Image: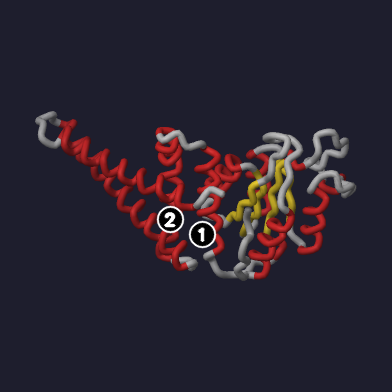
Amino acid sequence: MTKKRLYLGLSAASMLLLAGVIVYIWLTFSRQDLGVLRYISFLAVCVVLLALIVVVLGYAGIMFSLLADKDIKIFKKPITFTLSLLYPVVLWIGKLFRITQDKIQRSFVEVNNQLVQARQGQIPADRLLILLPHCLQVADCARRVTIDTNNCVRCGRCDIGRILDLCNRYGTHLCIATGGTIARDAVKKLRPKAIVAVACERDLTSGILDCIPLPVLGVTNERPHGPCFNTQVNIEAVEKAILFFTQGGKVNGIFT
């Protein structure tokens, strides 16, 4: 299993890179008489330095939240800024070290999940949205549940029926999306207070970043037949994620 420290370590490297950019700009332009360019470079240094300060605060907030397993409200905005800003830099640095995107994204999802679990509070079940990928449905099924989930006859050939049973039992909303646009439209329409999302590492990461600051618990799907084809999911993990939000308490061992 990919550890949280992978994403945290690459984030620290990203901050060092930002610091290096500041030093480079300063040393390159500050000692030269370039007229207006000197003032532009000074402004650029100030902007990058300000971003770095916020990122450092956000990174500190992430570390404190993970170590204390507690939401630290004063760091909330710096944390969201840090997650959004550093992510593409983290991917770029990971590529330099030949670390696969899947590993980085899985580590990111684990960091996000623990940050969400550190938050306290209970939400009504009807304000919770369960987002599923359409590839959970077996490819040769004639009943298209992306149009209407009531089309599912719960035959047991895929995990859709079992998750529908969970949603009916707990009273949560469900959306089976064929892409990011449909998922975003569902979020805008239902305006949930939290989301439980099932997807691959790439889609989970992009979805979490799109939904910031909305809390999203990500459950990585299983792909025994390859990506985007007859995928599966740990039903127990989905149920525990639902219970975390609807019962307002911590549930250990939610994700695999």
Estimate the x, y position of residue 203 in percent, counting from the top left: 60, 41
Indicate how the structure is coloured in the image.
secondary structure
Q: SS of the residue at dot 1?
A: helix
Estimate the x, y position of residue 240 in percent, counting from the top left: 68, 62
Judge left or right: residue 80 versus residue 123. Answer: left
Contact check, label 1 and label 2, Cβ < 8 Å: yes
Name the residue at 84% across, 33% down.
140
Name the residue at 31% across, 41% down.
17
Judge left or right: residue 159 versus residue 15. Answer: right
Inspect the image, locate mark 2, and give the three-letter code of the amino acid beneath it: Ile
Report which residue position mark 2 lands on: 79
Q: Is residue 107 above or below residue 27?
A: below
Furthest toward the front, the residue is: 1
Q: Is residue 216 above or below residue 48?
A: below
**Mark 1 closeness class: few <14, some 14–19, many ≥20 residues within 10 Å:** many
- Label disc, if present, on residue 115 of the rendered structure: 1
- Give whichever of 224, 192 is nearer the camera: 224
Viewer-nearest of labels 1 and 2? 1
Furthest toward the top, the residue is: 34
Cα distance, mark 1 to mark 2?
Answer: 10 Å
